[in-house]
Image (cartoon, rainbow, N blue to C red):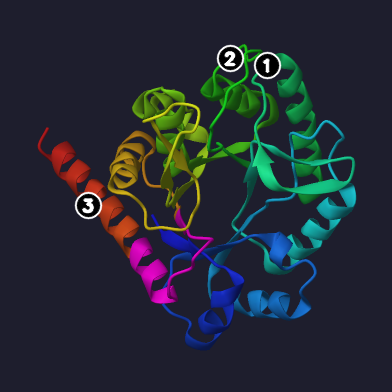
Amino acid sequence: MTSGIGLRLPHIAEMVATLPPAGWLEVHPENFLANPHATELLTELSLHYRTSVHTVGVSIGSVTGIDRTHLKRLRILIDRINPILVSGHLAWSTHNGEYLNDLLPLPYDEEALRLIEGHIHEVQDCLGRPYLIENPSSYVGFRTSGMSEVEFLCELVRRTGCRLLCDVSNIYLSAHNMGYDAHTYIDGLPAHAISELHLGGYTPEEDAAKPGAELLIDTHAVPIAEPAWDLYAYALRRFGPKPVLIEWDNDLPPLARLLGEAVRAHQIAAGIIVAEARCAASR
């Protein structure tokens, strides 16, 4: 069981200079594809740390298809740093060659399932490895959805052999926003397919559509809230030890603060392993 941090460009020089203890690093490859100097630094870090690639521009939900040029550039970077995992989002963010600075939702129906199934096969064939799909942060639903998000993800795993990135904070946030139970959601995921966990901070805002109600926004700009830590512990008991990543993308804290959050994630996991071992020994 290891815990790591999302490495963002403002921290990369300090990481190279100090090589602090960290279980592993995860990067958004789109920050490096057109930045040769940052790519050189990332390559150097990949010699010292296990590294994961978390894409934000593949857009497996786009009806206009996968950008194959982008995918080929992504393959070159992956071959260079040999990441332990490659992941992306259950969302769409491109249309007719235009990239949108957002991860937009999908209806959960058979048409979307077939579309994404084909795109996952294309991505996995090009990259030559399994692709992890991350559950989204949700704020709206579609009346046309004929299945739940969990059912949709399970079916993608069955049809494509992809893996899942379980974003625990997204589950807590979406459960609050959409009115379902977070623990039931986790119970419904296929444990054998979970290859990574994410934790990130969310920000409460007033829900303009429901005066007096609160909406949770996936900002990655604040510390991880205690309810998300509690749900993380529940996920570990359900899935067993998994690599976990601390995400912090906006209003970045000092690197030491990020590393401290990763230490807390590791300590929670270690405590669960010890407790379960004692329980098993007493039976």
Q: Amino acid at mark 2?
A: Met
For the residues bearing labels 1 and 2, Cβ distance under 8 angstroms: yes
Tell me if 216 is positioned left or right of 236 in this view: right
- Percent from the top left, x then y, of residue 167? 48, 42
**Quadrant of the snapshot with the N terminus:** bottom left
Circle nearer the N terminus (3, 2): 2
Q: Which residue is mark 2?
A: 147
The magenta stretch is: 245-262
Q: Quadrant of residue 267?
A: bottom left
Q: Earlier in the sequence, mark 1 or mark 3?
A: 1
Q: Position of residue 95 (x, y in %)?
A: 84, 39
Disc marking residue 271: 3
Above or below, 259 relative to 116: below
Residues at circles 1 and 3 in contact by the CB criterion of under 8 Å: no
Residue at 74 percent of width and 28 percent of height: 117
Secondary structure category for the residue under label 3? helix
Callout 2: helix, strand or loop? loop
Label 1's element? loop
Q: Which numbered dot is residue 109? A: 1
Q: Residues within 10 Å of mark 2 (few under 14, many from 20)?
A: few
- Image quarter of residue 81: bottom right
Marks 1 and 2 sit apart, C-alpha to C-alpha, by 6 Å
